[in-house]
């Protein structure tokens, strides 16, 4: 029995591989704490997969944390890198003069012919890297890129051997390094030059995939030898203000704090249906066809918050600012006044202006800046247009988990593709994450379109389960009586039920002391 | 007509067998082909890495012919003597 326990030596636990916090947004989460410290990580990617940006940002973030860096460039000239990276606001020339960044320039000069006249090795390169590391006190080294070195020298075998030695030298210098390498195919072999095996203790793959006519960038940690990481492809984006940002989906942990605190939906009747309003830390999905009053519900939700002195943030992807404000006035809500008082921020944007990853990043930033108590997105489904199915699912997961973590209440709307009944992709993705779902549906009765509302689910609370009629006037939304003599509303095929049938059904579930024989007769 | 002097700089990494071989090869080529018409300097990149950085030396040994133009780099231990002579733009005795 005891031998089983003695296999584990608690003394060795701490001596494993530790991680270096890179500071690149999201990467440290995907890498389960960062990159393996004191080791070399191969970053492989096809053309245009942002390898050089990652290599440079690795150093930039290091400098921000007081860790100098050395950039070994085989491909682009230092002046090109300085200029290209200036678009991210990174002043490499300044760091060079401050001694926290050094280039080892191995880029090719066309005018300098090289003639090979006997045996050689890359001793000079190693001496230069070592010199630069010691001179700056570098903790990080980026080598960009492996392929370019092969185009400079004829003896591929020598180069292979020397790259192995460079990795040894980097290890001896105790720096954490990134070496980039080209790939030909997005889902082909990692190795192209036959050296990747040497350095491939740790491999990260960057992809730039064309999917349903849309570009999608993803990062995958293929392996970290001897330590842990998150698996699978994570979307990332490259933005002028932040550089590379990875969006980790697995950051979603189901440990949000939740309270029993209720907040008003802005509509008294709806509050009553929900037994006193929504929970504060919850996400509510409002689903309905066009014209059912989703934007009205958003407006009331915001109004309800502002009346209590809460800060509200509205992301609108369907209507312009003017339209939204005019509509709100039509329902007796003054958005302009709320904005003046700092209780409201309305952000309008067409979904098409940027990729979904960029939308997500921007939304997160605005949320961080404004720190709202309530957040509304009208509509979430409009964003389906600019993304792939997979990308959209990642987006919905990412943004909802972010909101939940920030302890706000969120109201999302989703437009159903059909007028009667139906669900959208949005709902399929989000329905399990949301705490409450409210359905708004058209109901056709005797040639007339009426509207019905039901609270489909509300996590952790009792709620009214009937389908109630509601009307919209210049005071907003008014919820009335349940539809009594109809069935099949949610399916989009309401059918009239006769009085007799209703009585029969009522009787069927009645607790009848006289026995079952009495049921079923009108 | 006076010939321009050959200004040569040989970069090596430490005093290895390969380095010594390159130095010996360069000596004999210069003495045979350029007697009295050359200046040669040996730089050990382990001692002067900044020089190697400035000159962008990748491999060692590297022989840089600074003059006469054009600037040229010869990589290797200089054991391919015919190629070295060609690369240094040395006119052989037959031509003179």
Image: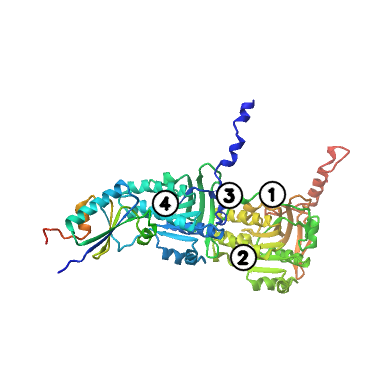
Q: Are marks 1 and 3 on the same chain?
A: yes
Percent x, y of residue A342: 71, 71
Percent x, y of residue B70: 25, 65
Letter of the chain that mark 4 sits on in the rendering: A
Res A242 visible? yes
Near mark 1 (Cα within 10 A), the count class, few <14, some 14-19 or many ≥20, is: few
Residue in view at x 69 percent, y 73 percent: A326
User: Disc 3 designates what residue?
Assistant: A33
Letter of the chain that mark 1 sits on in the rendering: A
Tell us which disc is closer to us: 3 or 4: 3
User: Disc 2 designates what residue?
Assistant: A317
Lower position in the chain sequence, tag 4 or tag 2: 4
Lower position in the chain sequence, tag 1 or tag 4: 4
- Nearest to the observer: residue B71 or residue A131: A131
How much space separates mark 1 and mark 3, taking CA atoms?
19 Å
Percent x, y of residue B71: 27, 63
Tell us which disc is closer to us: 4 or 2: 4
Near mark 3 (Cα within 10 A), the count class, few <14, some 14-19 or many ≥20, is: some
Lower position in the chain sequence, tag 2 or tag 1: 1
Lower position in the chain sequence, tag 2 or tag 3: 3
Residue in view at x 77 percent, y 69 percent: A475
How much space separates mark 3 and mark 4, taking CA atoms?
26 Å
User: Disc 1 designates what residue?
Assistant: A255
Q: Are marks 2 and 3 on the same chain?
A: yes
How much space separates mark 1 and mark 4, taking CA atoms?
39 Å
Indicate left or right for A254 with A183 as reference. Answer: right
User: Disc 4 designates what residue?
Assistant: A183
Q: Residue furthest front?
A: B36
């Amino acid at each position: 029995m005891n031998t089983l326990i003695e296999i584990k030596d608690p003394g060795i636990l701490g001596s494993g591989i530790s991680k270096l916090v890179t500071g690149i947004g999201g990467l440290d989460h995907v890498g389960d704490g960062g990159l393996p410290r004191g080791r070399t990580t191969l970053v492989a990617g096809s053309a245009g997969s942002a390898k050089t940006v990652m290599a440079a940002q690795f150093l930039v973030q290091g400098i921000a944390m007081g860790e100098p860096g050395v950039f070994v460039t085989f491909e682009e000239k230092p002046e090109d890198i300085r200029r290209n990276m200036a678009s991210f606001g990174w002043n490499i020339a300044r760091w060079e003069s401050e001694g926290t960044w050094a280039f080892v320039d191995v880029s090719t000069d066309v005018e300098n012919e090289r003639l090979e006249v006997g045996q050689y090795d890359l001793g000079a390169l190693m001496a230069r890297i070592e010199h630069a590391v010691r001179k700056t006190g570098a903790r990080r080294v980026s080598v960009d890129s492996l392929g370019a070195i092969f185009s400079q020298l004829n003896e591929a075998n020598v180069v292979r051997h020397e790259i192995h030695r460079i990795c040894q030298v980097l290890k001896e210098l105790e720096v954490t390094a990134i070496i980039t390498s080209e790939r030909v195919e997005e889902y082909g072999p990692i190795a192209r030059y036959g050296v990747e095996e040497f350095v491939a203790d740790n491999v990260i793959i960057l992809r730039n995939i064309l999917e349903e006519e849309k570009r999608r960038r993803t990062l995958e940690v293929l392996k970290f030898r001897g330590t842990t990481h998150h698996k699978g492809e994570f979307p990332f984006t490259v933005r002028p203000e932040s550089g590379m940002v990875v969006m980790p989906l697995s950051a979603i942990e189901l440990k949000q704090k939740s309270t029993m605190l209720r907040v008003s939906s802005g509509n008294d009747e709806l509050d009553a249906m929900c037994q006193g309003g929504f929970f504060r830390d919850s996400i509510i999905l409002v689903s309905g066809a066009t014209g059912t009053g989703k934007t009205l519900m958003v407006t009331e939700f915001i109004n309800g918050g502002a009346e209590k002195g809460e800060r509200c943030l509205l992301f609108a992807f369907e209507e312009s600012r003017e339209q939204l404000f005019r509509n709100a006035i039509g329902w007796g809500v003054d958005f302009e006044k709320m904005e003046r008082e700092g209780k409201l921020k309305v952000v309008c944007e067409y979904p098409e202006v940027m990729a979904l990853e960029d939308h997500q990043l921007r939304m997160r930033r605005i949320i961080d800046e404004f720190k709202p108590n309530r957040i509304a997105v009208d509509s979430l489904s409009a964003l389906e247009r600019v993304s792939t199915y997979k990308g959209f699912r990642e987006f919905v997961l990412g943004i909802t988990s972010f909101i939940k973590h920030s302890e706000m209440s969120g109201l999302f709307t989703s437009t159903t593709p059909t007028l009667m009944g139906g669900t959208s992709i949005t709902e399929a993705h989000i329905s399990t994450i949301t705490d409450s779902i409210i359905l708004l549906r058209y109901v056709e009765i005797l040639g007339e379109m009426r509207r019905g509302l039901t609270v489909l689910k509300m996590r952790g609370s009792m709620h009214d389960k009937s389908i109630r009629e509601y009307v919209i006037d210049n005071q907003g939304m008014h919820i009335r009586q349940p539809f009594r003599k109809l069935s099949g509303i949610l399916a989009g095929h309401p059918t009239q039920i006769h009085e007799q049938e209703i009585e029969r059904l009522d009787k069927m579930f009645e607790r009848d002391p006289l026995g079952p024989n009495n049921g079923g007769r009108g | 007509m006076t010939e321009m002097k050959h200004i040569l700089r040989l970069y090596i990494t430490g005093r290895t067998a390969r380095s010594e071989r390159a130095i010996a090869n360069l000596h004999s080529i210069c003495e045979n082909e350029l007697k009295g018409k050359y200046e040669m300097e040996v730089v050990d990149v382990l001692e002067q890495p900044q020089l190697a950085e400035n000159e962008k030396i990748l491999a060692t040994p590297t022989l840089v012919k600074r003059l006469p133009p054009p600037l040229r780099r010869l990589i290797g231990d200089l054991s391919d003597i015919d190629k070295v002579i060609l690369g240094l733009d040395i006119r052989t005795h037959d031509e003179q």
